Amino acid sequence: MKRIATLMLAVIMLLSIAPISMADEPVRIVAYTNVSAGGFPANLEDNYVYKQILDRLNVALEVIYLDEYDNALSARIMGDDDWHMCILSPDQMVTYASQETLLDLTPYADELKVIYETYGYDTDIASLYYNDVQYAIPAAKALGDYYYMILVRDDINQKYNLTVPTTVPELYDYCMAIKDIDVNNDGQNNTIPMTGWVNSIGLTAITAPFGVYLGNKVIVDENGKVSNTLLAPRMKEALEWVRKFWDAGLLDAEIFTSNSNVKANVIACNVGVAAMPWSNILKKAYTEQYKAVDPNAQYTWISALSDGQGGDPAYAIAEYEKYAGDKWSINIDCTEEEIEAIWKVLHYFCTDEGQMLCYMGQENVHWVYDENHDVQVTDRSKEANFVHAYQMLGRNDAYYLAAKFPEAKEAVAFGLATPKLIVYNGSIVCPETYNLVDLDAYVKEQVIAFIKGERALDDWDNFIQELYNSYDFQTWLDICEEQLVAQGLAK
Amino acid sequence: MVKSKNDRVFDLLVYLILIFVLLLTLIPVMFVVSMSFTPYAELIRRGGFVLIPSNFTLAAYREMLKGGELLGGMWVTVRVTVIGTVLNLIATTLTAYPLSRRQMPGNKLFTKLVVFTMLFSAGTVPTYLVVKYTGLMNTFWAMIIPSLITVYNLIVMKSFFEGLPEELFEAARIDGATEFGVLLRIVLPMSLPIMMTIGMYYAVAHWNAYMVAVLYITDADLRPMQVILRRMLKTANMATDSAEDVVPAETLRMAAVCFATAPIVVVYPFIQKYFVKGTLAGAVKG
C-alpha cells in the first residue's frame, strides 16, 4: 500500500512538473540576415547577445547570416524552410509579399507604435508597404557612409602655405597648385589633385554649390514640388566646372570606377582633395594605415563651398536616403506564440539595455559609463564588432557613432549639423513595369561622356529629351510624385 | 652535330619565346604569393605591385588562421574531398560500367535518361526540397550525396570502358568470371588513367565547393573552407582597433588564394601523367 502511494505521488509530481517545463521551453526564432559581421561567434554558446536575449525574454533568437543571400534566401523561402524573420530589400519585399509569404503587420499597430516612438520613425514610409498593406518593420539605414566630406591635407597646406578653398573657383586654383606638388614625397609624378567616391558622389564637392547632383535622384524643391536632380536649372554651369577640372587633369580617373581604388589612393597619400565618407578615412584604423605610409600626412575636412558668385555654400553631401535599404519582415506561417516572441525581441531592442547591447555589446565588458554617464569603449570593444547584425530596428547614429568611434566624434557632429541635399529615391518603390535600371545606366554613361568631353555641353537638353523619348522619363517623374505626395513628403 | 648559325638563331628565338611564355605564367603566380607576404605600407608605397617584397609579413596568414575557424573549415573540406571523391568514383563506376555494356537490356534508354538530367537539371529549389526532405540539411552528407554522380564524368568513363577490347571480357567470362568479377579484376586495373582523371575532377569540385554549402549548411562546425574564406574576405575591410591588426583586403585575398590552391597544386604533378591519358579517353575510338 505504501509503495502504491509512493508511486502515485511520484506520478502526480511528474505530471504537475511536465506542463511547467513545457511552458518554460524557449521560443526559437530563426532570422536570416545579409549583414555580414566580422567576429560573429560560430556557436550559440559563445554568443552573448543570444544568451542575454534568451535569459531576459526566454526567446532563442538565432540570427543566421546567409552567404549569397538572395539565392540562399529564395531557396529557403521557396523550399518551405523553418524561418521566422528575414531581412529584405524593398524589391524583395514586393516579390515575397506578392507571393503571400510575408505576414500582414496591419493588426500589430500597437506593437509597431512602440518602435515608431522609440526610434522616431514615420509611419507612412512607402517601402514598408505593398498594395497598401504593411509587410516590413521600419529601420533607418545606417547613416555612417552618407556623411560625405571634402577632405584636404593639412600638412600640405602648412608646408606650402596653401589657403583652404571656400568657393568652387578657389577649389580649382587649390587643385592646380597641388598638381605641381609631390604630396607623398616619393619623387615621382603621381600626385592626384582631387579624388572622390564614384557615381558622381565625389563630384558633388564641385556641383552641390550649384544645387546639382550628376545623376538620377529624386528631390523635393523649396515649394514642396517633386523634381529630379537631372532637371536642376544650373546643371550646365556645374557640368562646365566639372569638365574644367577634368580637362586640367585635376580629377582621379578612379572617380568613375572604383571606391576601393579611390580609398587606396587616399591611404597612399598621393591625393590633395578627397570627397568621400569620413568613415573610410577618419577611423583610427585607416588613419594609422595612411600614417604608416606618410607619418606627416594629416587629412582634415573643410567647410561647405559656395559657387563663387555670392550663392549660399552647399556641402558635398549628396545622398541622405532616409529609411532606404533593407528591412525585416515576418513569415506568414509563424504561430501566434512565435509572433509574440518576435515582438518581445523587437521591443527589447527599444529598451535602453537592448539598444546598448546591439550598439556596443555588454556593459562593463565592451563599454562602461564614465562619471558623466557618457559611454566609453573598453579595450575589449572589438569583440563586440558583430553586434551590429542585431540592429534590427536601425540605430541612433548621432549617439552610436560618437560613442563607437571617439576619434571621429567631431567629424560625426560636423556631418550631422551640415545641411544636406536630401534625395528620396529610397522612399520610392519602383513598379516592375518601369525599367529604372536601364535609365540609371544610361544616365551614368552619358554624364561621364559630358564630363570627359565626348559629348558637347550644349547637347544636355537633347540628352534630357532622349530620356523622355527613349526611357519614358515622364513616367518615372510621375511615379515619384505620386508616391511622395501620398506619403506627405511633397505637395 | 654542329649546328648552323640559322639553327642557333632559331633555337635562341624559341628559347626567348618560351621564356616570355614562362614569365607570362610565372609573374601572376609570383605576384599573388608576394602580395600575401608583403606588409601593407610597402604595398601602398610601391604602387600596389610587388614581385619581391623587401619585408616579409605573415600577418595575412595569421589573420586567416586566427581563432582556428579556417583550420576547422579546412578539415571539413579535406573530409568532404577524400570521402566524397571515393564515393563519387564508386558510384560513377558502378553506373558507367553497366551503361557501357551493349548487352545490358535498356542500355540506350537508361543512357538517354541520364543524359537528360545533364541537359535539363531540376533547378535550385527542387534540389533544395529533395535535400531537405531526405533529411540531409545541415549534415556532412549534404555536401556529397546531391553531387554523387556528375553526368559529364559518367559519360567520359562510359566511353573509356567502351573502348576496352571486347576480347578481354569474353576471355574473362570463359574463365568463369561474373560481371562484377570482370569489372573488379579486368576493367578497374586497366582504368587507372580514367580513375585518376575523373577523381581529380571530383576532388577539385569538392575542394572548391561553395554554393552547395551556402544552400544546405548553416551549422558553423560544418562550413567548408571556401565559405569561411569568402566571409573573411567580405569582412576584411572592416576597421579594427589598431593598424597592426589591419590586414587589407587585397593582401588577405592573395593569402586566401595561396591557401586554397596550394594543396591542389601540390597533388597535381603526381597525377599529371594519368591526367593526359585520361582526358583523351573516348576521344579517339575505332
Image (tube, helix red, strand yellow):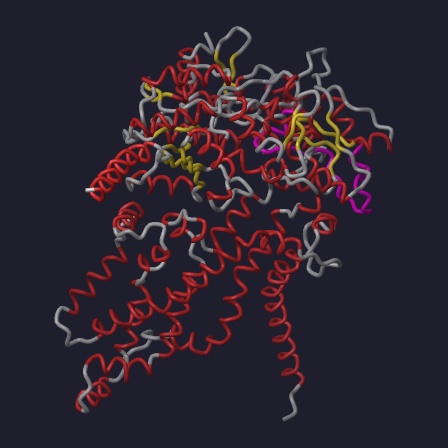
For the question of whether residue B160 can be seen, the reply is yes
Tell me what residue is drawn at x 18 percent, y 87 percent: B173
Across and down, in percent, residue B64 comes to 58, 53
Q: Main secondary structure of the magenta part?
A: loop
Residues rendered magenta in the picture: A178-205
* A219 sits to left or right of B218: right
Quarter occupied by the C terminus of chain A:
top left
Tell me what residue is drawn at x 42 percent, y 64 percent: B81
Q: Is residue A283 magenta?
A: no
Give the image quarter of residue A97: top left
Outermost residue to the bottom:
B1
Outermost residue to the front:
A1
From what the image shows, is residue A213 above or below residue B18? above
Camera-side residue: B227 or A316? B227
Q: Is residue A198 magenta?
A: yes
Across and down, in percent, residue A45 comes to 48, 44
* A350 sits to left or right of A198: left
